[in-house]
Image (tube, rainbow, N blue to C red):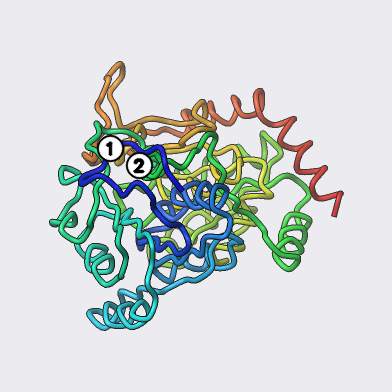
């Protein structure tokens, strides 16, 4: 089928088959969420395409079971170099028509190199780190900085695949997950607000004592139930202990796993999160989320197309028109005050609360 393509280097063949596609994106949950609209756009145009996704065990729990993902190949980095051998064996017998190299690091380049395909499409040389471009056969055109989601859409543009409003297709996908969501939400006498209390990098975290103050305001002033969510790393457990000491009425759901976390976020009235996977998961689920951003550039990795008015931007200085880049800024998260967050909660009250609670009630009562 002839495609209307944007330029690539070298030019793509005039016809590209889409019978078997491999996605190489092995990074964190947020990146996996950003790939979902690419996946759904491909399947909307080529519903018979067989899609294999290479990724790490964490985000694999979210991706596995998605109706548009046919095979999952696990890259378990805890196995060291054996992880590469595992993936190479898993891919050895499967020829692909197209490989999408959506990750720019060397380890992803090696995985792309293991695949057999006439077209391995990756980033242009300026954006491909660690000589990643050496492992691809074709590269998208150079582009100035933009949001990560739009970067991934460049691959669709290069292939001539239409896309408009992103479609993520996330949430509770089966009866068991929907039942969990109903039971979890129903145990409280008020709407829930998941709080993502720590991230993979301390520089992206907010201060536990400020979470305590927010918990009190949510519970006592706004009639909302704070729910602590995330994993069970030492830093998360330490933050959990400090928050529960100061706000014992908060509920902890740490360690629920990604699929249950998705169900919790999907059933929430509001979420509050720094820049980490659950923030992007909430956006994909269309759950209003107050984003706390200071370490990473919100123009590049902030909420994509929803809840921009709830974002707290501590990355830039007042009035600063900073560029869209990958520069990290240390010691910015402490600039976000409790008052900043509560001002956004009040804005949520005025702009989001009534329609959100109505939608949640309609959903839960229809089951």
Above-or-below relation of 183 to 366: below
- Pinpoint residue 281: horizontal percent, then vertical percent: 52, 49
On screen, residue 11 above or below 115? above
Instruction: Kindly check if marks 2 and 1 are in contact, taking CB atoms under 8 A apart as contact.
Output: yes
In the image, 361: left or right of 276?
Answer: right
Which residue carries the number 2 mark? Answer: 158
Rendering coords of residue 147 (x, y %): 36, 36
The answer to which of 200 and 49 lies nearer the viewer is 49
| Position above or below: 60 against 296 | below
Q: Position of residue 167 (x, y in %)?
A: 57, 43
Q: Does residue 356 appear left or right of residue 33 in this picture?
A: right
Left or right: 343, with 117 as reference point: right
Quadrant (top left/top right/bottom left/bottom right) for the C terminus? bottom right
Disc 1: which residue: 7
Secondary structure under tag 1 reads: loop
Give the residue at x 72% y 59%: 181
User: Looking at this view, is 147 or 156 the one in front?
Assistant: 156
Q: Residue at x 19, y 50 (%)?
A: 128
Identify the secondary structure beneath mark 2. Answer: helix
State the residue lying farthest toward the right: 366
How far is disc 2 from disc 1 in space, using C-alphas? 6 Å
In which quadrant of the rendered view does residue 2 lie?
Answer: top left
Q: Quadrant of residue 130?
A: bottom left
Badge 2 or badge 1: first in the primary sequence: 1
Q: Residue at x 49, y 53 (%)?
A: 39
Question: Which residue is at 38% across, 58% downward?
Answer: 28
């Amino acid at each position: 089928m002839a495609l209307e393509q944007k330029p690539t280097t070298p030019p793509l063949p005039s016809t590209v088959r889409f019978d078997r596609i491999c996605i190489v994106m092995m990074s964190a949950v947020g990146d996996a969420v950003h790939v979902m609209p690419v996946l759904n756009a491909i399947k909307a145009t080529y519903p018979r395409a067989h899609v294999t996704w290479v990724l790490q065990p964490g985000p694999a729990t979210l991706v596995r079971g998605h109706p548009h993902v046919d095979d999952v190949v696990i890259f378990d980095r805890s196995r060291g170099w054996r992880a590469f051998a595992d993936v190479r064996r898993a891919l050895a017998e499967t020829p692909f028509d197209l490989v999408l190299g959506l990750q720019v690091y060397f380890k992803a380049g090696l995985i792309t190199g293991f695949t057999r395909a006439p077209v391995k499409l990756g980033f242009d040389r300026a954006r491909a780190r660690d000589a990643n471009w050496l492992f691809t056969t074709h590269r998208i055109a150079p582009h100035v900085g933009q949001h990560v989601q739009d970067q991934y859409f460049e691959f669709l543009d290069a292939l001539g695949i239409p896309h408009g409003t992103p479609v993520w297709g996330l949430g509770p996908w089966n009866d068991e997950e929907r039942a969990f969501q109903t039971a979890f939400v129903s145990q409280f006498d008020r709407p829930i607000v998941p709080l993502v209390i720590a991230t993979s990098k301390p520089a992206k975290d907010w201060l536990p004592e400020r979470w305590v103050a927010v918990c009190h305001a949510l519970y006592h002033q706004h009639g909302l139930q704070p729910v602590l969510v995330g994993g069970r790393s030492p830093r998360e457990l330490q933050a959990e202990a400090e928050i529960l000491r100061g706000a014992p009425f908060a509920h902890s759901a740490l360690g629920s796993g990604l699929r249950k976390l998705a169900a919790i976020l999907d059933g929430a009235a509001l979420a509050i999160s720094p820049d980490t996977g659950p923030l992007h998961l909430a956006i994909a689920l269309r759950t209003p989320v107050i984003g706390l951003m200071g370490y990473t550039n919100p123009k590049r990795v902030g909420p994509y197309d929803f809840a921009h008015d709830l974002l707290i931007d501590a990355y830039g200085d007042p009035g600063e028109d900073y560029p869209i880049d990958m520069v990290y800024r240390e010691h910015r998260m402490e600039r976000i005050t409790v008052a900043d967050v509560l001002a956004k909660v009040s804005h949520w009250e005025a702009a989001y609360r009534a329609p959100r609670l109505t939608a949640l009630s309609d959903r839960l009562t229809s089951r």
